[in-house]
Image (tube, helix red, strand yellow):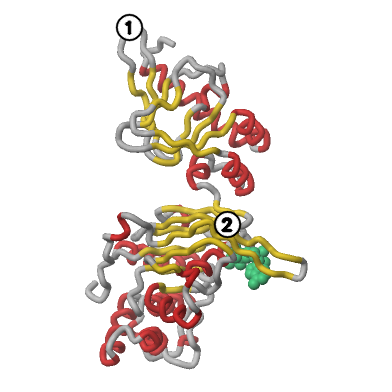
Amino acid sequence: MAFFQKNNNDSSVNHPMIDLREVNKFYKTAVGDYHALDSVDLQINAGEFVSIIGKSGSGKTTLLNMITGIDIPTSGEVWVNDTAVHKLSENKMARWRGKNLGVVFQFFQLLPMISVIENIMLPMDFCRTYPMRERHQRAMQLLELVELADHAHKLPTALSGGQQQRVAIARALANDPPVIIADEPTGNLDSKTAESVFTLFNDLVAKGKTIIIVTHDSALAKRTHRTALIADGEIVNEYVAKAMPTLTAAQLLQLTRTAKPQHFEPGAMILSEGTHADTFYVVSKGTVEVILPRTNQSDVVALQLGPGKCFGEIEFFHEKKHLASVRASESGPVEVLSIEYGQLKELLDQSEVTREALHQMADKHEDEHMSILGGSK
Ligand code: ADP
Ligand code: MG
C-alpha cells in the first residue's frame, strides 16, 4: 500500500518498538494508594501483533495508558519508537501521540457531529502531517481500505457498530503511525463483526504495523503472535503460561514470582545424567538439548526444547535422579526458569488438572526416551 511508509527496522534490531521497564502505577484513592501496575516489564518488537488479556480490573487499560501517554507511570520508564514517553511534557504529548500511535477504543469515540471522512481527516489536520490538499484523498483511501468508501459523507451514528469501529481504525491510521493500540476493539461487537475487525488488524500487521490489542476473547488472543497475561497489575511470564496452560492466572502469577531465571552460554551443561534431581525447568530463551546416555555407544540428542517447553518433570514423578543430561544448544545463549520440586508440588496440589497434564507429558517423554534407547532402560 503506497500510502503506508515502510517502517525503518534498522533500530528495532537492537531495541524493541515498545519497551516498558519496571513500570509502577499507583492511583490515589480515598482509602490510600492502589497499586495498579507492579514492576511491569514488557518488550514488543516492531511488526509484532500482541494481545493483552486478564480479568476486569487487572490493569490492562492502565497499561495501555502508559504506552499512549494518556497517563504517566509513578515510577519506571516507557519507551515507544525511541521516545521516552514518561518524560514527554504535556504540550508535546498530544502531537507526539498523533504521529506515532493510532488509538482505537471499545466504544469507537468518533465525533458525532461531523461526517465519517471528516473524522478521519481530523488527526491529519491536528498534526499537519500531510499537505492540506492531500488529506481528503488520503482519508478516502483509508475508507477504501476498511471498505467503507460509500459511507464517507454520512454521520457516524448512521453506521453499524462494526462499521463505526472500522472508521475508528481508519482514523487511527490517518497519520500512518508505526503502532496501533486498541482497548477491547471487538468488545462491543458481535462475533462475525469482531472477526472482520480482527482480519483488518491482521492485514495491518502484514503491512508492517506493530499492534497491541486488549481483548476478553481468548480465541482471538490465540491468533495474535504473542499474548501477555496480566493479573493484579503484574505480567505473568509468558513461557510459564505456555508451559502450564491449565493453571489459573493467580497460580501462574505465583509461579512467575517463584521461578528463578538462570542463564547458560551456548553449549554449556545445565544438568548431568545420574545426579540428584530437585528442580523443574521451563525454557524461556534459546533451545536446550536432552542427551540420553547409551551403553557402549555415543550419547544421543533425544529432544530439542524451545521456549515454553519444560524438563525435569519425569524425575519429579519418578526417582529423583536425572535420567538424561541437558545442555544449552550451540545455536545461542539459553535462559531457563527454575522451580524447586517443593514449590511445584505445592502448586500441583492446588491444580489436579495440571498435575495430570504434567504427568502425561512425563510419560510421553519417557516413552520417547525408551524408544530412542531401543527399549533398554
Ligand atoms: P482493566 O482495564 O484490566 O479492567 P484498569 O486498568 O482499568 O483495569 O484498572 C485497574 C485497577 O485500577 C482497577 O482496580 C481500577 O478500579 C483501578 N483504577 C483504574 N483507574 C483508576 C483511577 N483513575 N483511580 C483509582 N483507581 C483506578
Ligand atoms: Mg479496561
Q: Secondary structure at mark 1?
A: loop
Q: Within 8 Å of ligand 1, the CB of disc 2?
A: yes
Q: Is residue 138 above or below residue 374?
A: below
Furthest-right residue in view?
Answer: 31
What residue is drawn where x is 52% and y is 28%? 360
What residue is drawn where x is 40% and y is 54%? 225
Along the horizontal axis of the image, is 160 left or right of 328?
right
Q: Quadrant of the C terminus?
A: top left
Residue 352 position, x and y percent, is: 64, 34
Q: Which one is earlier in the sequence, the residue at label 2 or at label 1? A: 2
Residue 290 position, x and y percent, is: 39, 25
Q: Which residue is mark 1?
A: 296
Residue 275 position, x and y percent, is: 50, 17
Q: Quadrant of residue 353?
A: top right
Nearest the eye: 141 or 159: 141
Furthest-left residue in view?
Answer: 2
Q: Quadrant of residue 31?
A: bottom right
Near mark 1 (Cα within 10 A), the count class, few <14, some 14-19 or many ≥20, is: few
Q: Which residue is mark 2?
A: 54
Near mark 2 (Cα within 10 A), the count class, few <14, some 14-19 or many ≥20, is: many
Q: Within 8 Å of ligand 1, the CB of disc 1?
A: no
What residue is drawn where x is 48% and y is 71%? 87
